[in-house]
Image (tube, rainbow, N blue to C red):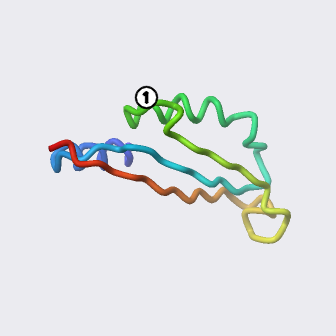
Amino acid sequence: VYLQKILKKLDEKKLKVHNTTLTLEGARPRLEPLIPKIKTSLSKILRINEQAIGITAHSGENLTPFGEGKGLQCIAAITLINEN
């Protein structure tokens, strides 16, 4: 829902997502097997090709609260282009 609101604002400003990269950190659940499904879902939401989405996932190795299984962290970088 949050992402849909942001996309609406981008549409109003004539901006479009060109590509994105995500880094996911968490001990649970194991995220590697889910990456293809996440890419498919995000490509539909963002209206971009799956090849324009990069995703890496790691366990955190017990070095952070996320690595201890106390949650998930996602860091995202998105490149926008002007549709004008």
Task: State the image coordinates of residue 78 (x, y, percent, origin top left).
Answer: 43, 53
Residue nearest the observer in this picture, 72 or 13: 13
Task: State the image coordinates of residue 57 (x, y, percent, origin top left).
Answer: 71, 50
Task: State the image coordinates of residue 4 (x, y, percent, origin top left).
Answer: 33, 41
Task: State the image coordinates of residue 51 (x, y, percent, origin top left).
Answer: 53, 33
Q: Residue at x 43, y 28 (%)?
A: 44
Instruction: Please identify the residue farthest to the right as the structure is shown.
Output: 61
- Looking at the rendered structure, the number of numbered marks drawn on it comes to 1
Q: Residue at x 75, y 40 (%)?
A: 32
- The amino acid marked with disc number 1 is Lys
In screen coordinates, is 3 left or right of 77? left
Against 78, residue 66 (above or below) is below
Quadrant (top left/top right/bottom left/bottom right) for the C terminus:
top left
Task: Name the element at disc 1.
Answer: helix
Asked where in the image residue 26 lies, by quadrant, the reply is bottom right
Quadrant (top left/top right/bottom left/bottom right) for the N terminus:
top left
Residue nearest the observer in this picture, 4 or 48: 48
Q: Residues within 10 Å of mark 1 (few under 14, many from 20)?
A: few
Against 79, residue 54 (above or below) is above
Residue at the disc numbered 1: 44
In screen coordinates, is 80 left or right of 70? left
Q: Residue at x 54, y 28 (%)?
A: 40
